[in-house]
Amino acid sequence: MLEQLSPGARSVGREIVADSPDVTGCVVLATCNRFEVYVDHAGDDGDAPPGELLEDGVPVALAQAVAAAVATASGTCADDVAAGLRPRSGDDVARHLFAVASGLDSMVVGEREVAGQVRRALAAARSEATTTAHLERLFQTASRTSRAVGSRTALGAAGRSVVGVALDIVAERVGLRGASVLLVGTGSYAGASLAALRARGAHDVAVHSPSGRGEQFAAERGVEVVTHAGLADALARADVVVSCSGAHGVVVDVEAVRTARARRGGSDGGPRPLAVVDLALRHDVDPAVRDVPGVLLVDLQAVQRHAPTVVGPEVERGWAIVEEAVRDFGAALAETAADPAVVALRRHVDALVAAELDRVRATGADAATVADVERSVRRLAARILHRPTVLARASARQGRHAEHREALTRVFADLDHPTNP
């Protein structure tokens, strides 16, 4: 299902926002092992009739709209998409995203690559004009939480990553120091792969891009570029192939690998071993390559099987940081409920100030006098507003926003018609 959904990921946000009146924003996070849709929903779930909400509080209509948009963008069946999606709402959304960004929900616990993917998901939503203030706050808090987990636990120093685990598997069969490597793809995983290869002593790296972006990638990183015409020769030279292009179709097929194997030679006269790493969600490498003699194929399933299982104090500390961030985020989000009341209060007091200044002008006072009165009145208004504003936000944090708003309305409405001059 993940493989089917990934090609249409970029258009999902536009589809949902355009077709769902109650959805004000959307961010899509699509990686090698997850497909997630975050929506800012303007509907009032509390007034929905029984039976119209899912168990976790997500409106049925919203879940159906998301599934339909994903199905349209990916060309899949809406029922299949709906069956594969797991709805979340409220604090569960923040908890999940913060854990994802921190590498606590990854196949390689503590991996740092996903933090960049979370940032790029928000950037993509910005470019599509589908983000909102709430989604901005959610994703920016996720990035801050990720940095906190990385700096306050040993997980950030462990250097775990999907690429790293894949190369560790390769190193058991093929020496990486001094190896000739063909890198297929120019995206974020390609950059991470190149850095990991160089850290392991593999500096003879050439890059091939099925989309034709290899020239810029190669120039920026000081590697050789391989054109489509030179792909067969590059395969024959390579000791290791790392493919992560996410192209819509196989880039390295069985016949190409067999031909490369026939052209390769080792010190003993036989063909040298070839390691092929496929990190693409939609396979860049035909899975049948694993059956070619002398070839080691490492795909995402192999990475998941070999990924180190991390338990104990560091992961517990990471989750504690996530829970702290969830509480702070929820409190900050609750405060926004007070914003309309605070704005209305300020407008009310501003109107009173303006009325008083008009009264002073009507007496024929000169400009200097009016300016002095305005400064004094505005200072007084600021002092009057400070305490109610602070209390409004505190009440919102405590879930007492409606009660505080009613009190403000009573007090300040009475100011318009004072009973005691």
Image (tube, rainbow, N blue to C red):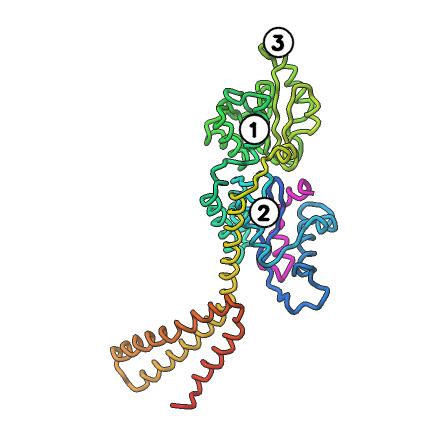
165 vs 193, nearest the viewer: 165
Residue 17 placement (x, y as % from top left): 61, 56
What amino acid does circle 3 point to? Gly
Residue 324 is marked as: none
Q: Residue at x 62, y 44 (%)?
A: 34
Q: From where the camera sits, is residue 14 visible? A: yes
Q: Is residue 231 above or below residue 6?
A: above
Residue 418 placement (x, y as % from top left): 42, 88
The residue range painted magenta reads 1-24
82 vs 154, nearest the viewer: 154
Most extreme residue toward the top is 269
Q: Which residue is mark 2?
A: 29
Q: How many labels, in total?
A: 3
What amino acid does circle 1 point to? Leu
Q: CA distance from mark 1 to mark 2?
A: 25 Å
Q: Are marks 1 and 2 in contact (CB under 8 Å)?
A: no
Q: Residue at x 48, y 43 (%)?
A: 153
Q: Judge left or right: residue 352 versus residue 50.
A: left
